[in-house]
Amino acid sequence: MNTAPIKKRYYFISALVIMLGFLLLFLPFRKNVNQLSPENLLLSITNNDRFYTTDEVAKLIILGDPSIQLIDVRTPEEFEKYSLQGAINIPLANILDEDEEGYLEWEGYLNQDIKTNIFYSNGSVYANQTWMLLKRLNFPNNYVMKGGLNKWVETIMRPEKPVSSAEDDLWTRYEFRKGASIYFGGGSVLSSDNTQGNKKKAPIKKKKKKAGVDGGC
Amino acid sequence: MGPLITQGIISPEWNPMIAFIVGIGFGFALEQAGFSSSRKMIGIFYGYDMIVVRVFLTAVLTSAIGLLFFNYLGWVDYDLLYVNPTFIWSAIIGGLFVGLGIIMSGFCPGTSFSALSIGKIDAMAFVGGIALGVFFYAETFELIFEKLYKAGNWGNVRIYETLGISPGLFIFLFIIFGIGLFWFTIYVRKKFSNRDLKY
């Protein structure tokens, strides 16, 4: 084997690379945070796309729609007392908990594009806060049940009879709510006892985050 | 903007397809550079051929510099890049075994496949060995390897974070190191290439 002469372009490449490196020394490192910009967040907050009404939620539950996942963001004690059928409990305070590997513990549920998550709390506030946190993290498919459980009780469990002169629409809705009320076992329309919710709970299985792609030579 | 798939600019379904295309390109590059020859690969250890070091150094420096500039221009979100978690003990011990395997066979896992595809018989034996090793490892994982595998988890660390310096400074130091190594390989090659090596 002969010793090849050192090529001129090696000098050139070395100089170029060192120069680029020198430049990088002074360029600021941009710390990108993968969050929604305030303008876009405002836009999403002001439009009401994120809401499901209690009627819609009731319908989805009754139809047994497999594409929705109800998520109760109240405390475990409250969840234990009463929860919607098929709901799982992820308390707002724990929503950003990390597992031992530093991933978000609930990310399997919250950051996915298969199911439609619908959050609810007693009112709308906690559910909205949850939604906003996840919106800022750019997690898709998260929605809020408008009015929360208070509205749920008011509209589904104890629907109010419209006045007799009311439009047909209102009557149709009332009929649906009456049926739903019976379905959810909150007693009949007449009963005011609504603490007997359907206690059937889905087992909570934590989903594993997808493993990244490994590389190698 | 980037990474394109994580940001949803390219849908994740394309992942295997892109991997396939990049894989073909990678194999082609390996073959073009002559890496499917075990003599070339093994040359690093005997000092008569340093092309492997130079090619990989160039690739590493190019992508590191490119990524940092992309980050500066806002084209790539650094936080979204996947970083392999560091399990320090399995990395060290596994690395030693891979090194031993490379010296013994003259292939690294990637190059063995490119050598296999041009019909080298020793590469076929090597790939068979990989398959056996993978099978053995998987079957005895809980029995033997699990403790080692999980020991010393440092998480998804980046080296500049561990050292507590800025990425720019680290890359600069790395470039100095890389260029130094580059010229060193030329020096080593000059020194050794005239010797009579029996291989």
Image: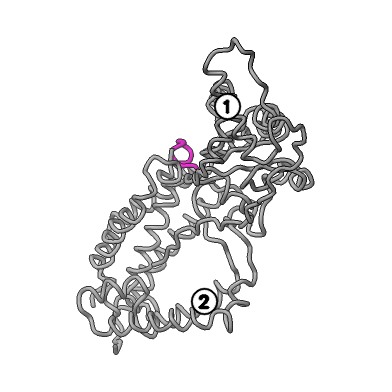
Residue A29 visible in the current orientation: no
Residue A159 or residue A135, whichever sits in front: A159
What chain letter is assigned to the residue under label 2? B
Residue found 52% across the figure and 60% down from its top: B84
Residue matched to label 2: B94
**Region rendered in magenta:** B71-77
Residue A201 or residue A196, whichever sits in front: A196
Tag 2: residue type?
Gly
Residue matched to label 1: A175
Compared to A181, does B198 lie above or below?
below
* Residue A151 quadrant: top right
Is B74 magenta? The answer is yes
Which secondary structure lies at badge 2? Answer: helix
Q: Residue B41 placed where, x, y %? A: 33, 75
Q: Distance between the residues labelled 1 and 2?
A: 68 Å
Q: In which quarter of the image is the C terminus of chain B?
A: bottom left
Q: In which quarter of the image is the N terminus of chain B?
A: top left
Residue B153 or residue B53, whichever sits in front: B153
Residue found 28% across the figure and 66% down from its top: B30
Residue A85 or residue B26, whichever sits in front: A85
What chain letter is assigned to the residue under label 1? A
* Residue A52 quadrant: top right
* Residue A177 quadrant: top right
Residue that lies at the very extreme toward the top in this rendered image: A165
Mark whose residue sits in front, 1 or 2: 1
Is A78 magenta? The answer is no
